[in-house]
Image (cartoon, rainbow, N blue to C red):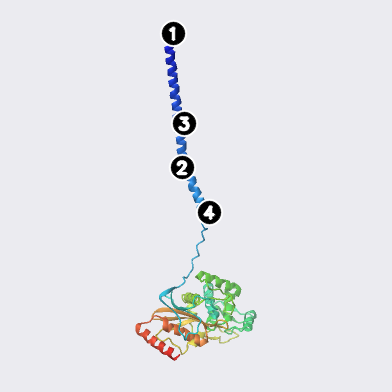
């Protein structure tokens, strides 16, 4: 009996031991299972936090603006030696002197404030025409609808007649040399079919150049309160035009004869208004004014855009609201004489002359 009891107890003990081992192993497996599960969840939690942060950052950040389109020109920077134009004899309310080669502003007066450009507009008209016409010998025939409104508006004209057929080159020279609105109307119709459509092209070209303070309403420069620019923008327009072979040729032409037609059997003899006004004037200290454009309306007064070549460098001066047609020439020459960089001896000579003229004034 005792032996049996002892054996039973042993069996029970073995069973209890086996059960304990099984329970322990199971607990260990469950604990390990929990640990693995937790470890697997850690990357998922981190990823969720990162995604949440990214969403919050995206929602809180400002929307990205599209990059500004590239433009053909950059606004000039002020030169280190830049000077404000304060000379007493100057009548122009707006002025700029640009070193065209370096693209720097040497001197200025209200140069980035809006003004009425008047016929300086025609430089942009010339640019758009030159870049959009393949053959400058192509013909255009004027109609009464072209000429009659210009007569009624008392716009400046080269003298073309209704029914007269001339070349695009004739129109370009008429627009610049004699500031003929008949020339600009013809160019607008040849290029775009109407002046309205052509003006859209002018404004598009202004944007392409990067101009921010210029807006055109017509191709001739007739006054309109929404037709404006600045001396700075106009200087950039002339600079761009002088880099175009066709434009430069016309802007620097002194005289030109248009095609022979039944209306004008010998053609029209066109003389550059700028050349006529410059007659008898010179820039003391050196340099030649090689070309440019004049302008006038009652509201704009006298405007002038010119290029000076001096010792192999190019300078552009634009003045606006001068008191007279020849005074605008004198305003421009004064700026060239006093602000274009010169040699020491020339500068001293000009300074002495300026002091003398100021004393007389």
Taking the spot 43% from the left edge, 83% from the top edge, the residue there is: 336
Q: Return the x and y of residue 102 as percentages of the image width and height.
A: 41, 74
Sequence-earlier tag: 2 or 4: 2
Q: How far apart in space, not on screen, are marks 1 and 2 (Cα)?
A: 64 Å
- Please tell me the numbered disc located at residue 59: 4
Out of 27 and 348, give the one closest to the viewer.
27
Q: Return the x and y of residue 260 as percentages of the image width and height.
A: 56, 84
Q: Residues within 10 Å of mark 4 (few under 14, many from 20)?
A: few
Q: Return the x and y of residue 291 as percentages of the image width and height.
A: 47, 82
Out of 340 and 10, give the one closest to the viewer.
10
Q: Residues within 10 Å of mark 2 (few under 14, many from 20)?
A: few
Q: How far apart in space, not on screen, are marks 2 and 4 (Cα)?
A: 24 Å
**Dot 2 lies on which element?**
helix
Looking at this rendering, what residue extends furthest in the front direction?
Answer: 2
Sequence-earlier tag: 3 or 2: 3
Determine whether label 3 and label 2 are within 8 Å by CB.
no
Q: How many marks?
A: 4
Out of 78 and 174, give the one closest to the viewer.
78
**Dot 3 lies on which element?**
helix
> Mark 1 highlights which residue?
1
Looking at this rendering, what residue extends furthest in the top direction?
Answer: 1
Q: How far apart in space, not on screen, are marks 4 and 1 (Cα)?
A: 85 Å
> Mark 3 highlights which residue?
30
> Mark 2 highlights which residue?
43
Sequence-earlier tag: 4 or 1: 1
Q: Nearer the viewer, mark 1 or mark 2?
A: 1
Q: How far apart in space, not on screen, are marks 4 and 3 (Cα)?
A: 43 Å
Horizontally, residue 138 falls left or right of residue 9, namely: right
Q: Return the x and y of residue 225 as percentages of the image width and height.
A: 59, 77
Sequence-earlier tag: 1 or 3: 1
């Amino acid at each position: 009996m005792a032996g049996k009891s002892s054996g039973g107890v042993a069996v029970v003990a073995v069973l209890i031991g086996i059960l304990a081992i099984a329970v322990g192993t199971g607990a260990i497996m469950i604990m390990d299972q929990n640990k693995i599960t937790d470890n697997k969840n850690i990357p998922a939690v981190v990823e969720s936090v990162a995604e949440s942060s990214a969403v919050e950052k995206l929602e809180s950040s400002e929307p990205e603006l599209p990059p500004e389109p590239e433009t053909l020109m950059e606004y000039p920077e002020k030169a280190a030696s830049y000077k404000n134009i304060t000379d007493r004899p100057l009548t122009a309310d707006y002025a700029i002197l640009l070193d065209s080669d370096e693209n720097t502003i040497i001197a200025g007066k209200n140069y980035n404030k809006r003004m009425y450009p008047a016929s300086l507009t025609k430089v942009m008209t010339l640019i758009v025409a030159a870049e959009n016409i393949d053959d400058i010998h192509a013909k255009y025939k004027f109609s009464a609808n072209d000429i009659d409104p210009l007569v009624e508006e008392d716009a400046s004209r080269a003298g073309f007649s209704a029914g007269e057929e001339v070349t695009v080159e004739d129109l370009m020279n008429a627009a610049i040399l004699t500031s003929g609105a008949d020339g600009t109307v013809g160019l607008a119709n040849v290029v775009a079919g109407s002046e309205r459509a052509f003006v859209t092209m002018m404004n598009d070209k202004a944007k392409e150049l990067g101009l921010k303070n210029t807006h055109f309403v017509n191709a001739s420069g007739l006054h309109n309160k929404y037709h404006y620019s600045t001396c700075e923008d106009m200087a950039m327009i002339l600079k761009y035009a002088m880099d175009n072979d066709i434009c430069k040729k016309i802007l620097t032409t002194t005289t030109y004869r248009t095609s022979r037609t039944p209306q004008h059997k010998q053609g029209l003899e066109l003389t550059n208004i700028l050349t006529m006004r410059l007659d008898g004037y010179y820039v003391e200290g050196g340099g030649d004014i090689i070309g440019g454009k004049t302008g006038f309306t009652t509201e704009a007064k006298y405007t002038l855009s010119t290029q000076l070549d001096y010792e192999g460098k190019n300078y552009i001066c634009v003045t606006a609201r001068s008191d007279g047609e020849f005074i605008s020439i004198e305003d421009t020459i004064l700026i060239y004489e006093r602000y274009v960089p010169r040699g020491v001896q020339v500068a001293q000579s000009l300074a002495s002359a300026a002091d003398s003229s100021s004393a007389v004034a």
